[in-house]
Each structure stands twice: as C-alpha cells, then as structure tokens.
Amino acid sequence: MFDLSGHVAVVTGGSSGIGLGMAEGLAGAGADVCIWGRTPERNEAAREQLSAHGTRVHAISVDVAEPAAVNAAFAETVDVLGGIDSCFANAGVGSGGVPFLEMDLDEFRRVTRVNLEGAFLTLQGAARHMVQRGGGSLVGVASLAAVEGQARGQHYAASKGGVVSMIRACAVELARHGIRANAILPGWIETRMTDGWLDAPVVREKVLPRVPVRRWGVPADFAGAAVYLASPASAYHTGDALIIDGGYRVF
C-alpha cells in the first residue's frame, strides 16, 4: 500500500529542511522525485543525496512566485519524469520578525508572494497535469502559525492560513477528477529557517517544555506523512490539515 514504484512526486523547496525530509521519504518508498529550489548548489547536493535510494531524481532551479518559471518547471518535470502524481507545495520564506506596527506593504508582500502566491501557482499547475492524468495528490505545507497567534508574523500567518483554506477549496472542487488535497502544519522544526533561534535560552526555557515529546522536530519527521499522502493508503483522505508538532498544539 505504501509502495510508490512508478510514482512521480514534485517537492518545492525540496533541497533542504522539511522539503528534503519529505523527498527522502518519497524516494525511499520508490518514487521518482523532482525537487524545485532556488539555489542550484543545494539542488545538486540534494539530488545526489536522494539518488542513493535508486530512483530517478531531477532538480530544477525555479522561483515559485514567477508564473512563467513555474510553467516551465512543470513542463520540464513531465518531460524528464513522464508525469506528476503528487505535488508538495513546500517552498516558503520566514517572517523576519518585523513588528506589526512597523510592517510595510513591501514586507507583507515579500512573504505572501512566495508562501501564498507561490503555493497557488504550484498547486494549480500540478492540478492541471493531474486532471489529464486522471488523479493525484496535492499537499500544501502550511504552519501552526495558520491556527495560532504569531507575534511579528502577521504576513507569515496570513500566508499559511491561506494555504490551508486553499487546500480545502481544492479538495472540494477537484475530487471529481480523482484529486485529493491536504495540508501539513509543522510545529517547531529544526531547519535553516529556524537555525539559531531554537537554541536561544529563552526559547528552550519557554517553548520546548510545551512540546510533549520534549524535542524539536526534524525534517525526517515528515517522511512518513509524505509517503502516506502520496500513496493509495490516503485514497479517501482529503480536505484535511495534518498537524505534525510533537503535541505542541494540544498541550
């Protein structure tokens, strides 16, 4: 049920962090994987790492907020790997910690351009291919910020809340085409985006005790969810938001 042999998955922001963790799980389950990222060097390093699983791995340098770049990346993915069965819209940028009263529109759009508009372009492009293919799985990677208040991150929260709502709308509209759509909401995860911040004494003192499993998450914690959502095991699972946070949300 979790064998992804012959399956083609696209993971944006797949060269590091949560994206790479999901790509590892997908490739390990037998899927061919195309990772999209903005940095060619990291893309190539991730491609070499994932190739160790013995499946086909392709990497493309693309800015997901640029419509022409997204369209070209989908065309290249299909040309190289033959199709698209699942797509993980994971690429994103952080909030930057700007106080709300000092946040200007350029800063707001810096985040929403990638996190929300980029997710829209990615999910829409993938869905168009999946309709022709007869079905597939769309996954939007959001954040706990979509459901909890985040000081100095109104633009980040808005973008991630928008991803969750967009996924739900996709689940309803695209089910007739055999396409399911779900969101993943990560909690406190050790990635490049949180590098240094999670090690701050105040964070370890105030935040970590609220995580019942008593550790920060790591990218590998998302491998299983990615495989499940890509696989036939989730055939009747759509419109949902999977929270992967070590229990933080409920404590």
Image (cartoon, rainbow, N blue to C red):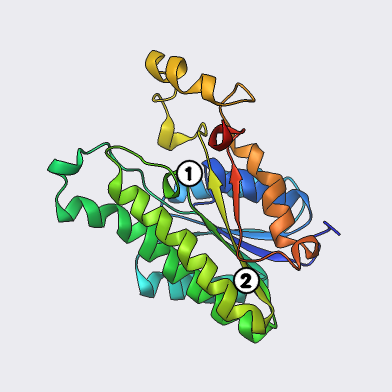
The image shows residue 2 at horizontal and vertical percentages of 82, 56
Relative side of 179 to 121, left or right: right
Residue at the (59%, 72%) spot, across then down: 171
Q: In the rendered view, tell whether residue 104 sits above or below residue 151.
A: below
Element type where label 1 sits in the image: helix
Q: Tell me the amino acid under the disc marked 1.
A: Leu
* Quarter-of-image position of residue 35: bottom right
Cα–Cα span, label 2 and label 1: 35 Å
Quadrant of the frame with the N terminus: bottom right
Q: In the rendered view, tell whether residue 169 sits above or below residue 97.
A: below
Along the polypeptide, which appears first: circle 2 or circle 1? 2
How many other residues sit within 10 Å of disc 2, few (<14), some (14-19) or many (≥20)?
A: few
The image shows residue 210 at horizontal and vertical percentages of 53, 24
Q: In the rendered view, tell whether residue 137 sits above or below residue 39.
A: below
Q: Is residue 64 visible?
A: no
| Front residue of 48 and 120 | 120
Residue at the (80%, 61%) spot, across then down: 233
The image shows residue 226 at horizontal and vertical percentages of 67, 53
Element type where label 2 sits in the image: helix
How many other residues sit within 10 Å of disc 1, few (<14), some (14-19) or many (≥20)?
A: many
Q: Are marks 2 and 1 in contact (CB under 8 Å)?
A: no
Q: Which mark is residue 144?
A: 1
| Front residue of 74 and 224 | 224
Q: Tell me the amino acid under the disc marked 2.
A: Val
Q: Which residue is mark 2?
A: 80
Quadrant of the frame with the C terminus: top right
Q: Which mark is residue 10?
A: none
Residue at the (53%, 77%) spot, across then down: 75
